[in-house]
Structure formats: C-alpha cells, structure tokens
Image: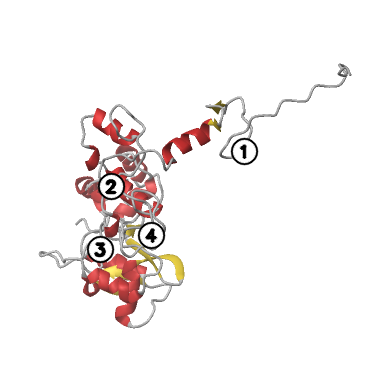
Amino acid sequence: MTADLTAPLAAAPTPVCAVCGKPPEPDNRLKGDAHIRYCYDWRRRNDPNRPKCPTVDCGRPILVKSTGLCDRCYQRKQRGNDPAARPFHQRNEGSCKVEWCTNDASHLGWCKTCYDWSRSNGGADPAARRWRYARSIEDLLALIMTIEPAPETGCRVSTGVFWTNPGGYPITTIANDPRAQTVTRLVLAHTLGRPLKAAMQACHSCDNPPCVEPSHLWEGTAADNSRDRDAKGRGARGVRNGRARLDPAKVRDIRARYVPGNNQHESNIAALAAEFGIKPQAIRDVVHRRTWAHVE
C-alpha cells in the first residue's frame, strides 16, 4: 500500500514556554528550547534548586558562579564595597517597617509613600514624617508637645514634622476628614473649645508661621492680623515695598516743592510726576498723605 503523496503534511507542533505556556515571539524567543526570555530570567532567579548567595540576609540565588554571589552582591563587590552593608537586603514582606504605618512594604521595607518621603527629604527616616489620615486631634496635640520649644522664643517649630503650604504654614489631616487643614487652626480651635468661624484666622503672636505652640496663637480677623503686623513694623510699607519708586528723602522734597492750584496749569503736579517718573495721582497721594503717611 502506497502513501498518499497528495495529502497535506501534518504541521509540526509549535514550541511553547515550559513556565507560562506562551509561544515565542520575535522579541521574546525561547532560551534553551524551554523558556521564553522573561520566564528564563525569572526561573534563573527563583529556582529553588539553585544554591543561595552566602551574603548574610541576602537569600538570592547564586548567578555568578566564579565568585559564588548573586548578581547584586557581585556588582557591589566589583565597586569595592562590602555586599553585606548594602541596603538591598531589606525584605519587603508584611507591612511598612514604620511603626504607625499600615501600608504594605514595597521599597526597602517601607511602603511607597514612606519611601518617596525619604527620598524627597534627603534620605531621612520616614518614621519622622508623622503624617497619617487616621490621626485624631488628641494625637495631633500629643505630637506637638514632643517638639522641643526654642529656648529664646518658646516657639515649637514644626518644620520637618508636617507638610507645609506655600505660605510656610503646617498642614495635616484629621481622622474621617480628608481635607488638608492648617495645624495652627486646629490647635487654636481645640484650645478655645469650639471651631473657628470661616472669617476668623489663627494669628501668631510670635510672627513665626511654622510655630504650633498653643500659647502663641490667637483668634482674629484678617484686619486684626494686618493691624498687628503694622503695629510691629512688619508691613511692606515705604521702601520695604518692592514696587516703591520713592524714598523718604524724595517724599519730603515733593511735599516741600508742591505748588497747590485749582487745575493742572496752576499746580506743578504734572512737572513733579515727570521729574520723579511716577503718575500725577501718586504725587497727589504723597502730598495729601494717603501714601507715605509715616514720613514726616
């Protein structure tokens, strides 16, 4: 009996990866006729039969046979460092190693939030960031009391303890309230035993925005805060104003040379304005003491 040469030949079976069962692709070929590249690398690092790196607390499989080390320990040794001293051996198992953080560990034993905080603060310990959504007002006050007051002023400066807004004031969140609130407002409300009204502000008697000392806070309106600022000489008045074009000597000169009149032809306001490079209305404000009133 002769074979039927016209029958189509049976297609050869397509090789697949022994780990994931996927066929090879042009950019992911089989290695060793058994595993695609990604699975090959994974199996190479997770093969339970491969001996472990002898570095203390490493536990990674040996990949560099000539030195008997894993790839990370080998690279560190090549740079002249002690493989046992590198930070990569922190196991990412369980929750974050920060005591009060309950997020899963993912980076060097920290959660991603604590790890990012450490990197943005020059490698500082995330345990010092002390910022969490589950904080109560009592926890907040207890945390503030752990800040050592400055010996000269008595201010409890919260820099490095809380996040700050663009104005330099510390902000945080309280349990069951996702809004970011200023710490000074929360502390003052607790001291007064009632919430502050929307139009009221938590003002500083020490004029130090990062200070969270309860005795340095008082309740006032924006106008009260401005009057307190002016009384202490902290306002941007006179030459402290970055847009000021005059100084006390020029103001006295303008007032001394001013010639009153019923119109612009009788008065010398236009001439003074052109000489000092300001508008005629600015000359009127100086003469009638609507501006530069503090200059005698």
Q: What residue is disc 3 on?
A: 230
Real-space Cα separation, disc 1 to disc 3, in angstroms: 77 Å
Residue located at (29% from left, 32% from top) = 68
Mark 1 or 4, which is nearer the eye?
1
Say whether disc 1 or disc 4 marks the residue closer to the N-terminus: 1
Where disc 3 sits, the SS reads helix
The residue where tag 4 is placed is 95
Q: Reading the chain from its start, which is encountered first: label 2 or label 1?
A: 1
Q: Quick one: quadrant of the C terminus?
A: bottom left
In the rendered view of the protein, which quadrant contains the N terminus?
top right
Mark yes or no: residue 244 visible: no
Q: Amino acid at mark 4?
A: Ser
Marks 1 and 4, Cα distance to the nearest angstrom? Answer: 33 Å
Q: CA distance from mark 2 to mark 3?
A: 62 Å
Disc 2 from disc 1: Cα separation: 34 Å
- 2 or 4: tag closer to the N-terminus: 2
Name the secondary structure under disc 4: loop
Q: Amino acid at mark 3?
A: Asp
Rendered location of residue 137, percent (x, y): 34, 75
Q: Nearer the viewer, residue 187 or 60?
A: 60
| Among the 4 quarters of the image, the one containing residue 212 | bottom left
Identify which residue is drawn at 28% across, 59% down. Answer: 127
Element carrying mark 1: loop
Name the residue tied to disc 1: 21
Badge 2 element: loop
Question: Residue 278 appears at what percent x and percent y?
Answer: 35, 42
Q: Which residue is mark 2?
A: 57
Sequence-wise first label, 2 or 3: 2
Q: Amino acid at mark 1?
A: Gly
Name the residue at the left extreme: 151
Q: Amino acid at mark 2?
A: Asp
Give how far across and how far down residue 34 sits, in percent. Answer: 56, 31
